Amino acid sequence: MGRAYEVRAAAMAKTAAKKSKMYAKYSMLIYRAAKSGIPDPEINVNLKREIEKAKKAQVPADVIKKAVDKAKGGSADDYNEVVYEAFGPNNSMLIIECLTDNVNRTFTEIKTIITKNGCKIGVPGSVQHMFKSSAVFSFEGLEEDEVLELLLMADCDVTDVEEDDGLITVYAPSTEYAKIKDALLEAHPDLELLEDLVAWLPLMKVKLETEEDKAIIKKVLDQLEDNDDVQNVFHNIEMD
């Protein structure tokens, strides 16, 4: 069928794999939120938040329903949030957030990805001090001054509000996440949050100078992305 067909088939397979991983990720998050309280999004705020994120990511309704029903059924599955820290080439650093039902398995898999690519796994706290845990929200349709006034009136502690070609980004301490989201959506219920997360933001960035270092970090990030337990990866690399 030719090379063009093979390329299309490979691209479709990769897309399907990414979708499958994304569905599994949100299914775990929804299940965990439902298990942590009452499995009803009208009562359980954390569950409602995870369902909203899943819908925004176009996760099918039946995947969401199965995750909630699984929690209602009293499943014994238990997921733990774990964070790993690593050092890459040229003093680069990574923070890897995972959600797993088997911490030993996940640690072994993450360590293998890191070390087989010539990088080093760090001990807890060895990397986090070079990052800041921050709530980050991005959206369009509002003015920078309007957003700042709205959040100040709601007594929110805001680090910064930036505007770039119509895109507003709000940065705040991670402890303000829920307060800021509630303030934004109470004032503008139809506001579409393009970014809505707690992220590890680097205090300083590094640049990879050699093609070899760039190839190493690309391989590491690709392999971490393919791991089912990895939820988010943050780094201090200034990407091209």
Image (cartoon, rainbow, N blue to C red):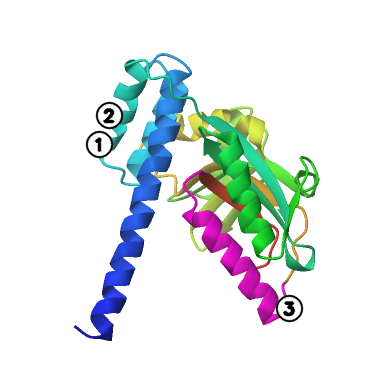
Compute the Cα span from label 3 to label 2: 47 Å
Q: In this image, 215 relative to 188: left or right?
A: right
Task: Report x, y in % for residue 86.
Answer: 72, 53
Task: Report x, y in % for residue 37.
Answer: 45, 15
**Residue 240 seen by the camera:** no
State the quadrant of the C terminus.
bottom right
> Residue at left 55%, top 35%?
150
Query: Which of the two labelled residues, at mark 1 and mark 3, occupies the earlier sequence position?
Result: 1
Give the structural element (helix, strand or loop) at label 2: helix
**Residue 175 seen by the camera:** yes
- Residue position for label 3: 209
Disc 1 crowd rating (10 Å Cα; few below 14, some 14-19, many 20+) is few
| Residue at far bottom of view | 2
Amino acid type, residue under disc 1 in the picture: Ala
- Residue position for label 1: 61
Magenta segment = 208-229
> Residue at left 66%, top 51%?
111
> Residue at left 60%, top 30%?
153
- Residue position for label 2: 65
Compute the Cα span from label 2 to label 1: 6 Å
